[in-house]
Image (cartoon, grey):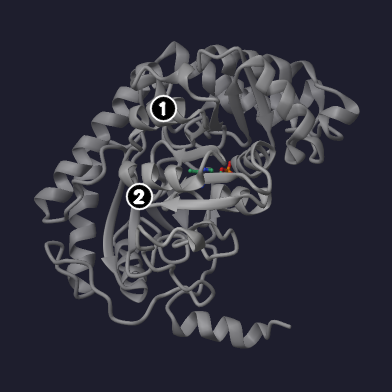
């Protein structure tokens, strides 16, 4: 049995102990954190819609009209009008035949992957994919080939080793902790050539990239080329929940086989109506997306001016990698004292030795705020003993106590690559 106190002490000693902070008021671009006002620079509410008056109003109206809860799984007590309406809008937004709502992105990824792969199959998954993808692979009991981050050559090698057992390639479009973008065109081409299904997680691409915020796939003109596109309602769309966009046959299949759809209560009407209002706002005024991108460029430029290296990210997610987890926490606390809230992110959310502040820009940030924030972050880093120009520092061993990182598998050593029990090289959390 796990010894809880010992485990918590171990986490503290490793600099990996977590607690949640208390936020008073809504999730706007400014928040009151543990009683102190700060610029919020770590939220996925990218377009600032979570507390938009129309979104709030739509959620409140829906509660009045349809009630607060959906009562049961949709296969039990039925699809409510509002679920159907949002699915139709999302399918049109993503340019696909169908959309299917799930309780959350976590539930969508675990449910869909486990529905599309089974024991004996091989799933190919980028090493920096989100935890929900990792867990979906585990749940499927298929063998998982974890290819090096965005490394198409490694993936090609893995596909060859799988000897036609490949069932699914799965990737984030925008990587949640790094802000870089998957090589979507090459993945589409590979999936097509080898007749393997492709699933793309657009949690961080929906509402932030592409024409009118339709996502990274739309930006690359590939919306129609993937089998399943997953998007969340809890990030740029300001609400809670998730959806997949796909063809009509896939949607029917998932209704009949995705256990997280079948065995979980449908999304509550206020969350659905809130997302619907946010989607309408986005469609009416796609300038929000451009503002987000301009803000990201501003923060990137200001951080570079301060000496930080943020060139790897092409998006609104900008990681300041400092290396050591305790150092990341120190920089975070100092920045917060200076009025900037950018949560430290440590293993197992990110790989060992890459603890960081993950900055997330919002469309509702003002230029001057971002400029000042970059300066505050640089001051905080220096005060904590980290010079922005310096390479990430590793003071203590910050490896996840649970997972030994998998060695880079030599390309000849095929057999153990497909052992689904082998620990992933990296485990990711929300
Ligand atoms: N995929 C990615 C890439 C994510 O970053 C997240 C949330 N952090 C999820 C899926 C899970 O989405 P949700 O929060 O709706 O469960």
Question: Would you say residue 177 is visible in this rendering?
Answer: yes
Residue 97 is left or right of residue 375, and the answer is right
SS at circle 1? helix
Quadrant hosting residue 19: bottom right
Question: Mark 1 against mark 2, which lies toward the viewer?
Answer: 1
Q: Which residue is located at x 81 percent, y 23 percent?
A: 66
Q: How many neighbours does mark 2 have within 10 angstroms: few (below 14), some (14-19), or many (20 or more)? A: some
Residue 107 rendering spot, x and y as whole percentages: 66, 42
- Vertical order, 78 against 132 (above or below): above
Residue 153 is left or right of residue 283, and the answer is left
Q: Which residue is located at x 67 percent, y 48 percent?
A: 140
Q: In the depicted view, which residue is nearer to us: 198 or 267?
A: 198
- Mark 1 and mark 2 lie on one chain; the one further toward the N terminus is 2
- Vertical order, 388 against 118 (above or below): below
Quadrant hosting residue 294: top left
Q: Which mark is residue 197?
A: none
- Vertical order, 284 against 146 (above or below): above
Residue 391 rendering spot, x and y as whole percentages: 17, 66
- Vertical order, 279 against 405 (above or below): above
User: Pointer 1: what residue?
Assistant: 188
Question: Would you say residue 43 is visible in this rendering?
Answer: no
Residue 32 is left or right of residue 272, and the answer is left
Q: Which residue is located at x 76 percent, y 27 percent?
A: 255
* Label 1 CB less than 8 angstroms from ligand 1: no
Q: In the depicted view, which residue is nearer to us: 183 or 196?
A: 196
User: Pointer 2: what residue?
Assistant: 149
């Amino acid at each position: 049995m796990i010894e809880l106190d010992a485990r918590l002490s171990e986490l503290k000693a490793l600099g990996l102990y977590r607690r949640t902070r208390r936020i008073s008021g809504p999730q706007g671009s400014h928040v009151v954190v543990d009683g102190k006002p700060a610029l919020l620079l770590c939220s996925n509410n990218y377009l600032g819609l979570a507390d938009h008056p129309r979104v709030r109003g739509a959620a409140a109206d829906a509660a009045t009209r349809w009630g607060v809860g959906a009562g049961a799984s949709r296969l039990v007590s039925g699809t409510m009008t509002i679920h159907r309406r949002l699915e139709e809008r999302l399918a049109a937004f993503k340019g696909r035949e169908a959309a299917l709502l799930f309780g959350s992105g976590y539930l969508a990824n675990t449910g869909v992957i486990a529905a599309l792969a089974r024991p004996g199959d091989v799933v190919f998954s980028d090493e920096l994919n989100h935890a929900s993808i990792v867990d979906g692979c585990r749940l499927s009991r298929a063998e998982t080939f974890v290819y090096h981050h965005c490394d198409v050559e490694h993936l090609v090698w893995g596909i060859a080793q799988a000897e036609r057992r490949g069932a699914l390639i799965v990737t984030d479009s925008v990587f949640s902790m790094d802000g870089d973008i998957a090589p979507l065109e090459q993945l589409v081409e590979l999936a097509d050539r080898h007749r393997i299904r492709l699933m793309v997680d657009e949690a961080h691409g929906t509402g932030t990239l592409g024409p009118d915020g339709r996502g990274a796939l739309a930006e690359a003109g590939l919306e129609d080329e993937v089998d399943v596109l997953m998007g969340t309602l809890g990030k740029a769309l300001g609400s809670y929940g998730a959806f997949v966009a796909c063809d009509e046959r896939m949607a029917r299949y998932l209704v009949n086989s995705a256990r997280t759809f079948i065995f979980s209560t449908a999304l509550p009407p206020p969350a659905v109506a809130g997302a619907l209002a946010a989607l309408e706002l986005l469609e009416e005024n796609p300038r929000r997306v451009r503002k987000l991108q301009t803000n990201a460029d501003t923060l990137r430029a200001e951080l570079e001016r301060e000496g930080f290296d943020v060139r790897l990210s092409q998006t609104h997610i900008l990681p300041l990698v400092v290396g050591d987890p305790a150092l990341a926490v120190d920089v975070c606390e100092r920045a917060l004292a200076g009025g900037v809230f950018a949560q430290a992110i440590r293993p197992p959310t990110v790989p060992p030795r890459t603890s960081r502040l993950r900055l997330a820009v919002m469309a509702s940030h003002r230029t001057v705020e971002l400029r000042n924030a970059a300066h505050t972050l640089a001051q905080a880093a220096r005060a904590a003993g980290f010079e922005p120009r310096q390479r990430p520092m590793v003071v203590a061993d910050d490896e996840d106590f649970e997972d030994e990182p998998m060695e880079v598998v030599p390309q000849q050593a095929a057999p153990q690559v497909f052992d689904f029990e082998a620990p992933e090289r990296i485990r990711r959390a929300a």
